[in-house]
Amino acid sequence: MSGATKDTIQKILLIALSAMTVSMVCISVFNYKDNKKKDKYLDNEKSLVQEELKEIIKNYAHLAKDYKSHAKEVNKEKQKAEKLLDNLEHTVLDYESILEYRRKMLELRKSNLSLQRKLYNGISIGTMNPSY
C-alpha cells in the first residue's frame, strides 16, 4: 500500500470513530434526560398515591371513632391501608409497581366506600365521603 492510501484509510477510520463517539454522547445525553423525566414522574405518582392512602387511613380513623361497635372491622381495613402505605414508602418504584399500588389503592377505596355504606345504612349519600 502506498503512503497516500494508508493516510486516507486512517482519516476515514478517524472520522468514523469520531462520528461514533459523537453519536454515543448524544444518545447518552438523551437517555439521561429521559431517565430524569421518568424518575420525576414516578416520584410524583408515588407522592400522589401516598397522599391518597393517608386520606383513606384518616377516613378509617374517623369511621372507627364514630362507629365503635364496628371498630374491629374498620381497624382491619385501616391496617391494610397502613401496610400498603408502609410498603410504598420503602419501595423503589417502576411503572409496573406503581400500577400495582394504584390497583390496590382502588380496592381499598371500594372497600372504604362499601364500609361507609354499611355503617351509615340509610343515611343519604350527602353525608358520606364517596371520594374514597
Image (cartoon, rainbow, N blue to C red):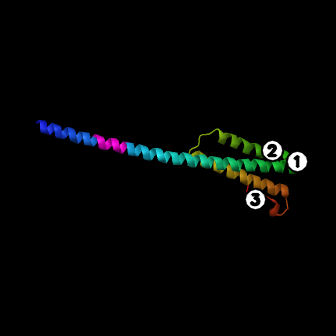
The crowding category of the residue bearing disc 2, from other C-alpha atoms within 10 Å (few below 14, some 14 to 19, many at least 20), is: some
Quadrant (top left, top right, bottom left, bottom right) of the N terminus: top left
Q: Secondary structure at mark 2?
A: helix
Amino acid tagged 3? Pro
Amino acid tagged 2? Asn
- According to the picture, the residue beneath numbered tag 3 turns out to be 130
- According to the picture, the residue beneath numbered tag 2 turns out to be 75
In x, y percent, where is residue 130?
Answer: 75, 59
Report the side of 45 relative to 38 (left or right).
Answer: right
The crowding category of the residue bearing disc 1, from other C-alpha atoms within 10 Å (few below 14, some 14 to 19, many at least 20), is: few
Report the side of 51 relative to 127 (left or right).
Answer: left
Residue shown at 71% from the left, 48% from the top: 53
Residue shown at 17% from the left, 41% from the top: 8
- For the image, the number of numbered tags is 3
Instruction: Tell me whether the residue at label 1 lies in contact with that at label 3, contact meaning CB atoms closer than 8 angstroms.
Output: no
Q: Residue 79, located in which quarter of the rendered image?
A: top right
- According to the picture, the residue beneath numbered tag 1 turns out to be 68
Magenta span: 17-24
Q: Could you tell which of marks 2 and 3 lies nearer the N-terminus? A: 2
Whether residue 18 is in magenta: the answer is yes
